[in-house]
Image (cartoon, rainbow, N blue to C red):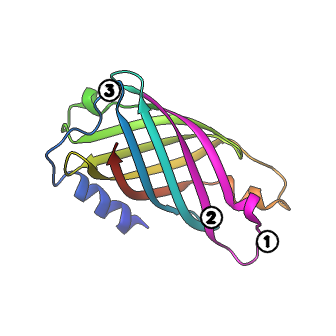
Amino acid sequence: MKNIVFVVFVLIFSFGNSQAFKGKGDQKFQVGANFQDEATGINITYDYGLGDNISIGVSSSYALGVDDRLDADFGDRFDLKARFNANIGSVLNIDENFDFYPGLSLSLKNFGGHVGARYFFSEGFGIYTEAAFPLAKYSDDKSDVGYYIYNQFTINIGASFNL
């Protein structure tokens, strides 16, 4: 896992020729893999720029590979989130192709935070990585499958597209 994150950050700081976050009206679509202790899956996000450094959006994840000891049905595997991002790549002024965005999310399963970065190689295509963590847990009941899937740190890695 550490090697994957390292490779993504090396790629983020190696290339580029477009702008990562343009501000009001900017639209981003991301699709990637979701990694966590009890499951792996897919993650899809959509973000819409409200201002120079603010965006809102939605995110959905589906756990495909759930640990065999957990009996997870569709409702246990699926999550939908509303999200808020502070896009501060332009404030940090690292590179116009780079965006760093801490944020908050409210989902069907928990309330959490995330920290992400994306880098665009061209006007329409880039990569992203995002770390998410719960602030208010889904369940404290250890007999509930959601306790094991949604009460943990996760990493998302994938492709980002300008719409």
Q: Place residue 93 in its image quadrant.
A: top left
Q: Nearer the viewer, residue 28 or 132?
A: 28
Kind of residue sitting beneath label 2: Ala
The spot of residue 65 in percent (x, y) is: 61, 73
- Residue at the far front: name it: 163
Tell me the residue at 30%/39% (across/down): 99
Badge 1: few (under 14), some or many (20 or more) residues near its Cα, within 10 Å?
Answer: few
Q: On the image, numbered disc 3 is attached to which residue?
A: 23
The quarter of the rendered structure image containing the C terminus is: top left
Mark whose residue sits in front, 1 or 3? 3
The quarter of the rendered structure image containing the N terminus is: bottom left
Kind of residue sitting beneath label 3: Gly
Q: Which residues are magenta?
A: 55-84
Q: On the image, numbered disc 2 is attached to which residue?
A: 63
Q: Earlier along the polypeptide chain: callout 2 or callout 1? A: 2
> Is residue 66 within the magenta segment?
yes
Tell me the residue at 35%/45% (across/down): 117
Lateral position of residue 104 relative to residue 93, left or right: right
Q: Place residue 83 in its image quadrant.
A: top right
Q: On the image, numbered disc 1 is attached to which residue?
A: 71
Q: Is residue 32 above or below residue 103?
A: below
Callout 2: helix, strand or loop?
A: strand
Q: Earlier along the polypeptide chain: callout 1 or callout 3? A: 3
Badge 3: few (under 14), some or many (20 or more) residues near its Cα, within 10 Å?
Answer: some
Contact (CB < 8 A) between labels 1 and 3?
no
Tell me the residue at 86%/62% (across/down): 143
The spot of residue 160 in percent (x, y) is: 35, 51
Callout 3: helix, strand or loop?
A: loop
Q: Main secondary structure of the magenta part?
A: strand
Q: Is residue 45 above or below residue 89?
A: below
